[in-house]
Amino acid sequence: MKSYRIHLIRHGSLDKIHSGKYIGKKTDVALSSEGISELKLLKDKFYYPEADLIFTSPMLRCVQTAHTLYPDRNYLVVDELSECDFGIFEGKSYEELKKDPEFIAWAKEGMKDAPKDGESGAEFAQRCYTGFAKVAEYAMKAGITDVAIITHGGVITSILSSLAFPKREFYEYNVNNCCGFTVTTTPQLWMSGSVIEIYSRIPLKHDDSEID
């Protein structure tokens, strides 16, 4: 039975003016020039897995990352792979929000409830699952055994924390910009419970060992 490899890669870095802010689905910003340079440097120094087809979030930062890492590959946009919709908190930092009663209540509940004009944790998790399922099932139907997904840190964490084995603490799935995980699955594993297995981190050294 065929095994399918799916590479989940977080987009490159944004301009520093966005640092520490809730940059989600409503904020379609480009990579910074430093972010593009970092991607190119990492691509030269380390190994990003080959992929026969690229899937990407529709957000500009992800599309640019796809073009930089895989310039000669076709890509398909999957709307469900967008970052979380932070609603009225979008584009604001903790410092700007820390005295806002709505933000305080939202954070106190673990960000599970939907902020005004945004989406709940459960809605986001379901959307991430739907997006990943579209990719996995497309690959299996087409017999494409090696694909990459260029998406957001929150999306990667959501997918892995709900589907991946071995099970890990939520924070262990956090990834830096330009980094990610390779997972594997088979049609049997997927059909029996949407199971994926952690294979390695991304990028790798050229000897296939993980970066310390």
Image (cartoon, grey):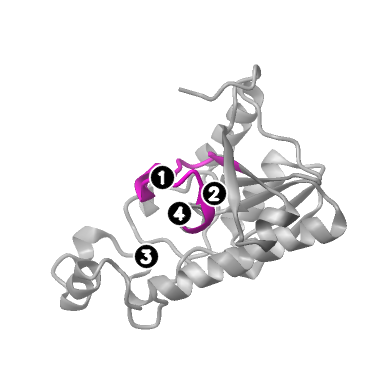
* Chain-order first, disc 4 or disc 2: 2
Q: Dot 2, how many residues are within 10 Å of its Cα: few (below 14), some (14-19), or many (20+)?
A: many
- The residues colored magenta run 162-182
Q: Which of the two residues, 95 or 32, is positioned nearer the viewer here?
A: 95
Q: Is residue 150 magenta?
A: no
* Residue 145 visible to the viewer: yes
Q: Position of residue 69 (x, y in %)?
A: 68, 39
Please report the residue visible at 57 percent of the width from the left and 65 percent of the height from the top.
129
Please give the residue where the numbered disc 3 appears in the rendered image: 91
In terms of secondary structure, where does tag 4 sit?
helix
Please give the residue where the numbered disc 1 appears in the rendered image: 168
Q: Marks 3 and 4, how far apart in space?
A: 25 Å
Mark 4–mark 2 CB contact (< 8 Å) = no
Q: Position of residue 117 (x, y in %)?
A: 39, 82
For the C terminus, which image quadrant? Answer: top left
Marks 3 and 4: which is nearer the front?
Answer: 4
- The image shows a total of numbered marks equal to 4
Q: Which of the two residues, 45 or 193, is positioned nearer the viewer here?
A: 193
* Chain-order first, disc 3 or disc 2: 2
Instruction: Classify residue 205 as left or right of residue 123.
Output: right
Q: Marks 1 and 3, how far apart in space?
A: 30 Å
Mark 1–mark 4 CB contact (< 8 Å) = yes
* Chain-order first, disc 1 or disc 4: 4
Q: Marks 2 and 1, how far apart in space?
A: 30 Å
Res. 161 mark: 4
Res. 31 mark: 2
